[in-house]
Image (cartoon, rainbow, N blue to C red):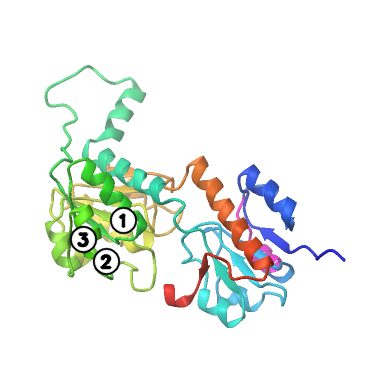
């Protein structure tokens, strides 16, 4: 008899090619619309599926995992970040968790540089003037930004994405500094011409640009808190393409309002889609709708990794991108 196909539930709309391949390989239930599942829908999916394919908009916490059915054996996350999944609770229930690391490294690093340039060169202000038809012509003192070449860039989190940002920033003539849980190997530091700071406080106080590229974990929540933001120079800017929870957003607003930080470029927010209204009103703040990984190529590769993880599991092997609590 042919082997029974795995029951797979996908919580959001994925690229058509990914959904088609999932349908060819598994007994898959896809979404008709792109609205996030409700809590009740997620619980129902966890009760009936062998494999759940969530995204960062789905909260897979201990309460949901305890209500999962006996069939659920794999949570194959569509995305690299897994702070929305209680990996430890899943492990206790015998449920494996996988993700899609490395796929969006270059895309997110590109967007980080776009935000650095957007803030320092005042690009949104120029766009707004042109879109309103208010441009009166070139003037020697109009829309003066700052040159990025020669500026000190402090990277908070020197993993794949942080290193990719460093490579791009070097090409722009920036000086690379970083803080990380572990110091990089000497040959990587030499390649990136990067200066390591054991003390985050000391690094932040000396940087012209701070780039947040670390994951959100209990130890990184509000890592850039009011005290550390106060250490930043008045002419410094901060950009974040990682997770909004790493920055105390209210404290950031206060520093920006007081003119104690020159600007900010944000692709992620502390409270998801509930962006602090004050940020929308500041001309020195560039806001994007979590676009860091939004490339066609990246989203297709994420889907391919999800499929490989599920297929490998279905074949009786450990998923290549399995996440365990020790990795967090």
- State if disc 2 and disc 1 touch (CB < 8 Å): yes
Chain-order first, disc 1 or disc 2: 1
Residue assigned mark 2: 180
Q: Are marks 1 and 3 in contact (CB under 8 Å)?
A: no
Q: Determine whether 288 is above or below 205 in the image.
A: above
Query: Looking at the image, which is closer to me, 112 or 61?
Result: 112
Q: Please tell me how crowded label 3 is: few (under 14), some (14-19), or many (20+) other residues with Cα within 10 Å.
A: many
Vertically, is 111 above or below 218? Answer: above
In magenta stretch: residue 44: yes
Q: Helix or strand or loop: what does disc 1 sit on? A: helix
Above or below 137: residue 189: below
Q: Secondary structure at mark 3?
A: helix
**Image-based side of 316 in relation to 273, left or right:** right
Q: Quadrant of residue 254?
A: bottom left
Give the mark, 3 or 2, whose residue is nearer the N terminus: 2
- First along the sequence among labels 1 and 3: 1
Quarter in which the N terminus is drawn: bottom right
- Alpha carbons under labels 3 and 2: distance apart: 18 Å
Q: CA distance from mark 1 to mark 2?
A: 10 Å
Residue 46 occupies which quadrant of the picture? bottom right
Q: Which residue is mark 3?
A: 229
Q: Is residue 34 left or right of residue 241?
A: right
The residue range painted magenta reads 35-45
Tell me the CA gap for discs 1 and 3: 20 Å
Residue at x 35% of width, y 54% of height: 161
Is 88 situated above or below 296? below
- Residue matched to label 1: 162
């Amino acid at each position: 008899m042919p082997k029974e196909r795995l029951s797979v539930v996908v919580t959001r709309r994925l690229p058509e090619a990914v959904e088609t391949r999932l349908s060819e390989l598994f007994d898959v239930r896809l979404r008709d619309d792109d609205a996030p599942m409700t809590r009740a829908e997620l619980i129902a999916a966890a009760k009936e599926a062998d494999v759940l394919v969530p995204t960062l908009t789905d909260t897979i916490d201990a309460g949901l995992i305890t209500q999962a059915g006996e069939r659920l054996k794999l949570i194959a996350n569509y995305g690299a970040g897994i702070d929305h999944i209680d990996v430890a609770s899943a492990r206790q229930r015998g449920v494996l968790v996988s993700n899609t690391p490395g796929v969006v490294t270059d895309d997110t690093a590109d967007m980080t540089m776009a935000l650095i340039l957007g803030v320092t060169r005042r690009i949104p202000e120029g766009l707004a003037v042109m879109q309103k038809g208010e441009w009166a012509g070139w003037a020697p003192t109009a829309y003066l930004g700052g040159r990025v070449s020669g500026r000190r860039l402090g990277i908070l989190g020197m993993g794949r994405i942080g290193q990719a940002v460093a490579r791009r920033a070097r090409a722009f003539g920036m000086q690379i500094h970083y803080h990380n849980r572990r110091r990089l190997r000497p040959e990587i530091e030499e390649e990136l011409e990067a200066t390591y700071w054991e003390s985050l406080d000391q690094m932040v106080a000396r940087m012209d640009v701070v780039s947040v590229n670390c994951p959100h974990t209990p130890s990184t929540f509000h890592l850039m808190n009011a005290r550390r933001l106060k250490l930043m120079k008045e002419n410094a800017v901060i950009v974040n393409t990682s997770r909004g929870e790493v920055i105390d957003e209210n404290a950031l607003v206060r520093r920006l309002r007081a003119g104690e930080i020159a600007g900010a470029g944000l692709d992620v927010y502390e409270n998801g889609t509930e962006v602090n209204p004050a940020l929308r009103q500041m001309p020195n703040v560039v806001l994007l709708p979590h676009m860091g990984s939004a490339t066609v190529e990246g989203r297709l590769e994420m889907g391919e990794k999800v499929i490989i993880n599920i297929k490998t599991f279905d074949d009786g092997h450990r998923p290549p991108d399995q996440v365990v609590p020790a990795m967090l």
